[in-house]
Amino acid sequence: MDMLYQTITKNNFKKMVEGLMENNEVIGPKWRDLDTEGNKIYRFLKLNNFDELQMDYTRSYSSPKNFFLPFKEDLATYNLNDADWDQQIQYTIHPRVIIGMRACDINALRKLDEVMVKSVYPNPYYFARRRNTIIIGLDHEPLEDCFCHSMNANVVLSGFDLFLTDIGEKYFVAINSDTGYMMVNRSGGQEVTEEDQLNFKKVKQQIESKFKTQVDVTIVPELMDLEFESEVWKKWGDKCLSCGSCAMVCPTCYCYGIEEEADLTFTRATKRRTLYSCNLLDFAAVAGGHNFRPEPHVRLKYRYYHQFRGFVEAFNQSLCVGCNRCGVACLAGIHPKAVIDDLIQTETR
Ligand code: SF4
Ligand code: SF4
């Protein structure tokens, strides 16, 4: 459907969410803890009541990706009886709602859709979760290190049901699905007034003016080829601890490993997928003991290659959405902006 716009008062939004909670699992940003500097740590989790929903949250350290690509999932289970066996595959998902996703995180899902839904080998587990999840996005002012603006991921026009912008007493709502339209209209959605439009523009301009971090990615795909042997990879790769945290928090990383586990009686077995990271030591290890990428700097380089070069070639867009979660999670202080700036400087020196 074409995008429609309405407004909803905050009180009616609360009633809408409480109504959704009656029949669906509702997930949203919750306050979990404080960091060492006393800042709140938020995480997307199941909400038990509306008051747990933190619509003013700043950043979630891990992304909502894991509601679509869980860290671990059983793909199939097997029962073995004498010479006979049967296989069970389960991808039924109870309908659920995720509230509060940022534009960059919804754009991250749209990128995953390219691989998991539209590619030659779609992922039915991901597809079932995506189809059965209502997404209510939320605008926000960027943090100092967000560079989603540089990655064209700060604005989203599809991939959600509703997208909210806080304009004071109400939310300005972009409606992008029939389900979203019904939800808003049943909850007292109102026509957009001139005053609402003015307030919306003001908020959008304010958001736009708050971007501080820019990463120049215009020549990065070519640079990745030109600087394939650059010392920059060694410089940053030598710091890398090969811990894989960057991929775990990234809203778009989707590398995985498969393992099969049989119980001790050999009557039951499970095929399991676990998200993995291309920075881990054994990611490119193969049978026979050979490792195609034994050094950390080569693995780091390939992660950047996938994000900023390989995905561009395959889908005409970068895989990175500029959230800088990887930079925050990295104990070695490896930030995408620093690595890319370094590559650009090498080329222009
Ligand atoms: S900034 Fe880092 S975590 Fe965020 S999308 Fe890009 S590579 Fe992934
Ligand atoms: S989080 Fe940092 S140290 Fe860990 S694998 Fe990623 S780049 Fe290397």
Image: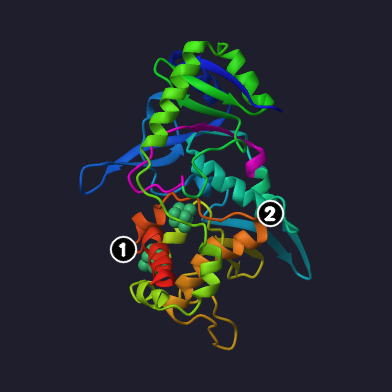
Q: Quadrant of the C terminus?
A: bottom left
Q: Which residue is mark 2?
A: 123
Say what amino acid the circle numbered 2 marks. Asn
In this view, the residue farthest toward the right is: 84
Mark 1 to mark 2 CA distance (whole Å): 34 Å
Q: Is residue 127 above or below residue 333?
A: above
Crowdedness near tag 1: few (<14), some (14–19) or many (≥20) residues, C-alpha within 10 Å: some
- Residue stretch rendered in magenta on the structure: 129-149
Q: Which mark is residue 311?
A: none
In this view, the residue in front, 265 or 97, is 97
Say what amino acid the circle numbered 1 marks. Gly
- Which residue is at 38% across, 25% downward? 51
| SS at badge 1 | loop
Residue 273 placed where, x, y %?
59, 61
In this view, the residue farthest toward the left is: 37
In this view, the residue in front, 138 or 144, is 144
Q: Is residue 275 magenta?
A: no
Residue 285 placed where, x, y %?
54, 80
Q: Is residue 144 magenta?
A: yes
In this view, the residue in front, 290 or 338, is 338
Q: Is residue 11 above or below residue 154?
A: above
Q: Quadrant of the N terminus?
A: top right
The answer to whether residue 272 is seen in the rendering is no
Question: Quadrant for ligand 2?
Answer: bottom left
Q: Is residue 164 above or below residue 124?
A: above
- Which residue is at 51% across, 63% downward? 220
| SS at badge 2 | loop
Ligand 2 closer than 8 Å to the CB at disc 1?
yes
- Which residue is at 42% across, 35% downward? 208
Q: Which residue is mark 1?
A: 333
In contact (CB < 8 Å): disc 1 and disc 2: no
